[in-house]
Amino acid sequence: MAAIGVHFGYSCACVAVFKDGRADVVANDAGDRVTPAFVAYRDNEQIVGIAAKQGRVRNAANTVVKVKQVLGRSFDDPETQAHKAETKCEVVNKGDKLFYKVQLEERTEHVAPQDVAKLIFHKMKETAQSALGSDVKDAVITVPFEFAHDQKKALREAAEAAGFHVLRLIHEPAAALLAYNVGQESHHGKSHVLVYKLGGTSLSVTALQVSGGMYRVLHTLTDHSIGGERFTEALAQHLASEFKRSFRQDVSGNARAMLKLLNSADMAKHSLSSLGSANCFVDSLHDGMDFDCNVSRARFELLCSSLFNKSIQPIRTLLDEAGLTSSDINQVALCGGSARIPRLQQMIQDLFPEVALLNSSPPDEVIAVGAALQAGLLVNRDPLELDLHREDVDVSATDILLKELDEAGSPMFSVLLPSGTPLPARRHHVLKGPGRLSGLCLELYQRLGSELPEKLAKIVLRDLPPREEHHDIDTVVTMKRDGSVHVSCSEQSSGRSEALTIAAAS
């Protein structure tokens, strides 16, 4: 059976299909294997992809970009406010929710971020169906590791609204390792893998432990201040300086002219990943004057040298915070479009001279390929076999703790499921309570990072028969892939038991 893997990024989206035992990225109707996550609104149509990106020169106020940044967030969220300040499409508050204000010729429309994301997902679905020649709905969608429950929910709902049957959400680092077949051939021994993802608007670095075919996230860092767009902007500023030098005209304050230069710089940046030089031509840049400029790879690397250094520093920070050294890393996996840049690859190689970089697939396609491989496993394999084989893909984002009392009666917390535990997971714990008590209370907590524990639920066992010895309470905590938690307690001597299910421990 065919299935789909979709990587919905901040600046681009990519879809891969699993068919006949392999996963392949498919090209859209423009012939591109990666689609810009741009949506433009006109009177009677919505335009998605490269046409929307190129058309923003004339239609910037009605073109939505980086919608993933605000999915599942409230209007007052700092990320929403940062997005509001950056985007040229007006953002308004309606009922503490963000809407894009789109001004058309005869009317004004307010568009929710989920509706924008739905159009991008629909474009991915159309692209996959065109390649397969038939309808297909089963899909695995990737999400950043740091996404909160509400963000994941909003992404899933947008995909389902576009007609997908979402088999699972998996984290981007896990999808990258699946695409590179890391840990799948051998199920013995432990190794450490670093996943370096540099996309259009953000950088994420993740350290994982691979053991027995399973992945466990040790630490992750995300920086939204660096990405491929920063390199494009640096090159566009250089082009503006060259135009000023040649024509004595300053276009740096002309928004339309700078958008034209950004489009040209973006194409040149991609060319410089494989060529030693690239030509930048802009028709009628200013006052009817055309602009033509050749940029060498060496010039591009010089212009972006400080940005490259900023892109590498998070690796050092991550290793320090995770208690690892460069010699502890066995493999480095590259993903994200900007990871194509040769200079960046060389700088990463210099940090890990003994490690071969995993870069066999185009980095901007890797995550979609991994998602498609996971989708293929889900639709073609026995569910029980799958649970045993791939219970590492979804991981717990929070610590699940049990509150107990020590001999002095002071509260203490035991960690049952630490953050990063592969899901589904099951833990058995035996509690002891004084035999004279006729009732016992068990409290369950969750903790995100270094925050104070937050109570999730409590279970009370009542009418326990008195005992000369302790009451022994068998406690089983199970967390499923969707984040729901099931807890059961049973007193060993009497068999009295209670159980509850917590819908989501996000």
Image (cartoon, grey):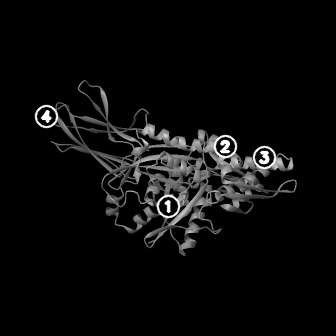
Where's residue 443, x and y in %? 32, 36
Q: Contact, CB < 8 Å: mark 1 with mark 2?
A: no
Give the CA distance from mark 1 to mark 2: 38 Å
Crowd rating for badge 4 (residues with CA inside 10 Å; few <14, some 14–19, many 20+): few
In terms of image quadrants, where is residue 406?
A: top left
Residue receiving disc 2:
84
Where's residue 141, x and y in %? 50, 58
Nearest to N terminus: mark 4 or mark 2: 2
Say left or right for 330 vs 196: left
Q: Nearer the viewer, residue 180 or 158?
A: 180
Which dot, 4 or 3, sits closer to the camera? 3
Residue receiving disc 1:
360
Say left or right for 134 vs 445: right
Q: Contact, CB < 8 Å: mark 3 with mark 2?
A: no
Look at the numbered disc 1 and give the secondary structure of its residue: loop
Residue receiving disc 3:
241
Nearest to N terminus: mark 1 or mark 3: 3
Give the residue type that dot 4 points to: Arg
Most distant residue in the left direction: 468
Nearest to N terminus: mark 3 or mark 2: 2
Residue shown at the point (16%, 34%) measured from the top left: 470
Which dot, 1 or 2, sits closer to the camera? 1
Which dot, 3 or 2, sits closer to the camera? 3
Give the residue type that dot 3 points to: Ser
Say left or right for 421 vs 50: left
Q: Nearer the viewer, residue 386 or 215?
A: 215
Give the residue type that dot 1 points to: Ser
